[in-house]
Image (tube, rainbow, N blue to C red):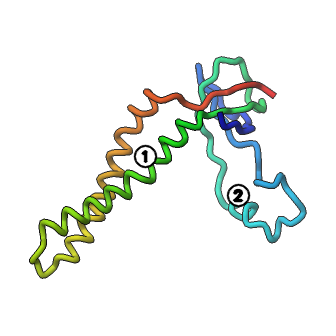
Amino acid sequence: MIEELAVVVKIDKHQVWVESGQASACGGCLQKTSCTTNAIGSVLKKKSVPVDCDMSLQIGDKVMVAIDENLLLSASLLLYLLPLIALFAGAGIAEALTDNSPYADLWTAAGAILGFLLSLWLINKAQKLLILSLRRPIVVKKL
C-alpha cells in the first residue's frame, strides 16, 4: 500500500474529500526560490479527491490515505499505454487502407489522431465501470 498524509476538506455519507497535506516534496527547505518542486506546486491548484471512509471524521482532520499498488499500476497502464497503442493502431489501419492515395500521409496522421481520441473517449466511458469494480483509496487512520 502507498500511503499519503491528507487533510479532510468535505464529508459525505461513506466518503470524505481530502487534499494532500504536503506542500512540497522536500518539506519546505530554505531554497524555495530555486526549487522546481515548489514552483510547480505553487502554480497547480490543490485538488480534492474522494476517498472511502467508515470512521467518524471532521473537516480539518489529518488522515493517512492508502492506495493499493496494483490499482495504481493498472490505472497507469490504462491511461498511458492504451492511448499510445490506439494511436499506432489508427495510423497503421489508415496507412493500410490508403496505400496508393496521393494523401496517404495525411490520412495516416488523421487515423492516428482518430485512434488516440477514440481511446480517450473509451477510457472516459469505461472509467465509471472500472472505479466500481476496482478498490479505491481508503482512509487508514486518523492522525
Q: Quadrant of residue 11?
A: top right
Assign the N terminus to one quadrant of the image: top right
| Quarter of the figure with the C terminus | top right
Residue type at the position of mark 1: Leu
**The residue tagged with tag 2: helix, strand or loop?**
helix
Callout 2 amino acid: Gly
Label 1 neighbour load within 10 Å: few <14, some 14-19, many 20+? some
Residue at 60%, 38% in the rendered image: 49
Mark-to-mark CA distance, 1 and 2: 26 Å
Q: Residues within 10 Å of mark 2 (few under 14, many from 20)?
A: some
Q: In the picture shown, does residue 96 fall above or below 5?
A: below
Question: Mark 1 sits on what residue?
Answer: 78
Relative to 97, residue 51 above or below: above
Q: Mark number for residue 41?
A: 2
Q: Position of residue 56 (x, y in %)?
A: 71, 18
Which percent across, then down, holds residue 129? 38, 32
| Badge nearest the viewer, 1 or 2 | 1
